[in-house]
Amino acid sequence: NAGVMQNPRHLVRRRGQEARLRCSPMKGHSHVYWYRQLPEEGLKFMVYLQKENIIDESGMPKERFSAEFPKEGPSILRIQQVVRGDSAAYFCASSPPKGWATEAFFGQGTRLTVV
Amino acid sequence: AQSVTQPDIHITVSEGASLELRCNYSYGATPYLFWYVQSPGQGLQLLLKYFSGDTLVQGIKGFEAEFKRSQSSFNLRKPSVHWSDAAEYFCAVGAGNDMRFGAGTRLTVKP
């Protein structure tokens, strides 16, 4: 049973480009969470999704950021027109339907660098 | 609003010494409590969790944590630190599908 898979592990984008971060949850997990980790800071919640449904996006910036979790395929976090301040590590976690009450597993993260 | 505070940004201990990492939370009800460890360039690994019952929780790698409701704390402890324990440690609190993390405590282990 493979763990939560995130790709790419490292992503470099020039300012103004788009960044696409992928997260494949563990088998049997239907909930996905995205977090952002800035240097010297903890993990900040961004969005919580179930398949084909955004449950809570209260942590998502209002512009340029979007997330989806389609019926088939990985969850995608999309950042349009990236800026230097978007440079961070982005972590995905997945859990079964009972959510954190059981256990959520984290991927190894995608480290985005905007140059 | 719920929040998690890890008062110590950076802690240095000698190998073999004991360790305590502090975590305080603010939450409407008794939340679920977690400690995660993150090695450089890696994801987060769950050390232990508290949902209910015995307030002293045993985790992996020799770690334990104690939930103290009166102090709203969930401190992580280890009796004897190993060099491989050097990492970043995160306390997290949650209920349902809401999970919040502290800013982390970086642990340095001196030989």
Image (tube, rainbow, N blue to C red):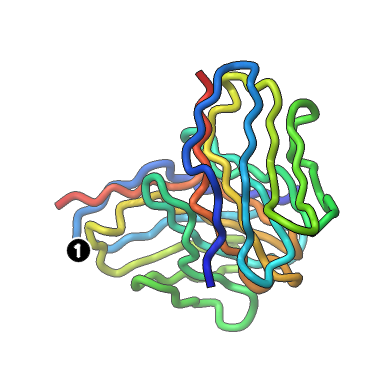
Identify residue type, mark 1.
Gly
Q: Where's residue B90, x and y in %?
A: 50, 53
When the figure is inspected, residue B65 is found, relative to residue A55, above or below; the finding is below
Nearer-the-camera pick, B37 or B14: B37
Q: Where's residue B58, x and y in %?
A: 45, 77
When the figure is inspected, residue A16 is found, relative to residue A70, above or below; the finding is above
Q: Where's residue B45, x and y in %?
A: 47, 61
Quarter where residue A5 is shown: bottom right
Which residue is painted at 56% across and 82% down in the image? B54
Nearer-the-camera pick, B102 or B75: B102
Q: Is residue B51 left or right of residue A9?
A: right
In this rendering, the count of numbered labels is: 1
When the figure is inspected, residue B61 is found, relative to residue A83, above or below; the finding is below
Q: Is residue A33 visible?
A: yes
Crowd class of label 1 (few under 14; some 14 to 19; many from 20; radius 10 Å) = some
Please name the residue that numbered disc 1 is placed on: B16
Q: Is residue B47 left or right of residue A96?
A: left
Q: Where's residue A18, x and y in %?
A: 66, 26
Q: Residue at the far front: name it.
A: A72
Which residue is painted at 61% across and 83% down in the image? B53
Q: Is residue A21 left or right of residue A48?
A: left
Q: Is residue B70 visible?
A: no
Which residue is painted at 81% across and 49% down in the image? A56
Which residue is painted at 74% across and 32% down in the image? A65
Q: Is residue B109 left or right of residue B38?
A: left
SS category of the residue bearing label 1: loop
Chain letter of disc 1 in the image: B
Q: Residue at the far bottom: name it.
A: B53
Nearer-the-camera pick, B47 or B23: B47
Nearer-the-camera pick, A7 or A92: A7
